Amino acid sequence: MVIKLDFEFTKEQVLIRETARKFAHEEFKKELAKRIDEKCEFPWELYKKAGQLGLLRPSLPEEYGGGGFGVLEDVIVREELTRVDSTLGQAIISGPFGAELINLYGNENQKKKYLPKVLSGDNVMFSAFTEPDHGSDITKLSTTVIKKGEKWVINGTKTFITNAPLAKFGIVLCQEPDKIPSHRYQTMFIVETDMQGIKINELKGKMGQRGSPIGEIVFDNVEVTEEQLLGKEYRGFYQALHFFIYGRLGVAANAVGMSLGAFDRALEYAKSRIQFNKPIIEFQAISHKLSKMAQMIDAARLLTYQGAWWIDNKKDADLRTLSAISSMAKSYASEVATNVIDMAIQIFGGYGYMSDFDVERYYRDARVLRIYEGTTEINDSIIIENIANGKLTL
């Protein structure tokens, strides 16, 4: 058997990486990041500039404002932006959260109506899955939908919803009540936030990622029509699982970028910080720590790139296989981010614990990577389940 592995980027991928890197280095100012973090603001100006450069979701079709590339190009952009700054980069790439769902399951009218608005950087959007009583387990939901004539009526509450306080539209997953098994009666709808019966409350007090606001969305007899149905009725649960493949890989890319950002800062500090008449990088305890950080980052990066390659090149792959691969990248990369940034703080010593230095903020921004888009524990369960049933082989 001949196995061909090519680890080089194409010319287009190199250009995308350079564009994202140049944009971030020129536009991401430390003072701005600190202000966004302290005041919990969304960086609208940067978001719009990223949209103009085609950096928001380069994988989506050109006719809707994307670049017509692949998921690997999305990963490259995410990595570059969060590497330069975790707060600003994360906020920008979270703006179109759920755009993949509309591209995967929306009809032509829905794609034309909604995707250009977020890919241009003019709007952000949300995807509402989590509820006060249902986080990792979405097989049963409290947000209900009942069909009445030609319309459906939605009631319930979603919480921890990224972009909810800012978005003009988004996606909600709900289910018909009193049906068994409940997940087979879930449906998705596109809703607009000015619809009668929708109330959004911003949630304050986030530990990190403060440039991405979150909120609680209350649905009180919200009426939706056939035009707002996303995909097919009663297929919402399966559509969500498909979307999580993209979402979890995106988190892995964010984690790799944040890890690299912390490593860059720790390496620079270790070469310039003088103790006992020499740079601390010359002490084996520090140099070996940096070596381990580099190894973990590269392993996480390769897992993430592998996941993107599978999505882009294995169009006929079983979704359970893709799910396990993206879960593996997400679980490992998010753990790596926590550990690498923690080691970066240790290298900085007391300075690393202070808000004047970026690594403290990186640590706060990275901690939630192990929670959203499926906790580490949930993703680990997905991985081993699919190894056990033969959908993923090592």
Image (cartoon, rainbow, N blue to C red):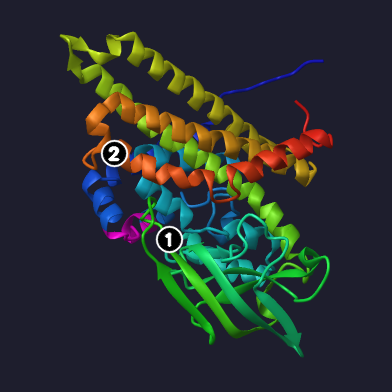
Amino acid beneath label 2? Asp
Q: Residue at x 45, y 60 (%)?
A: 120
Residues 205 and 117: in front is 205
Majority SS type along the magenta span: helix
| Quarter of the figure that contains the C terminus | top right
- In this rendering, the answer to whether 196 lies above or below 103 is below
* Image spot of residue 272 (x, y percent): 21, 19
Question: Helix, strand, or loop for circle 1?
Answer: loop
What is the total number of numbered labels drawn onto the structure image? 2
Q: Residue at x 81, y 34 (%)?
A: 388
Q: Quadrant of residue 306?
A: top right
Was residue 360 drawn as part of the magenta stretch in this picture? no
What residue is pinned by disc 2? Answer: 358
* Image spot of residue 33 (x, y percent): 28, 49
The answer to whether residue 14 shows anywhere in this view is: no
State which region is magenta.
39-48
What residue is pinned by disc 1? Answer: 121
Question: Helix, strand, or loop for circle 2?
Answer: helix
Amino acid beneath label 1? Gly
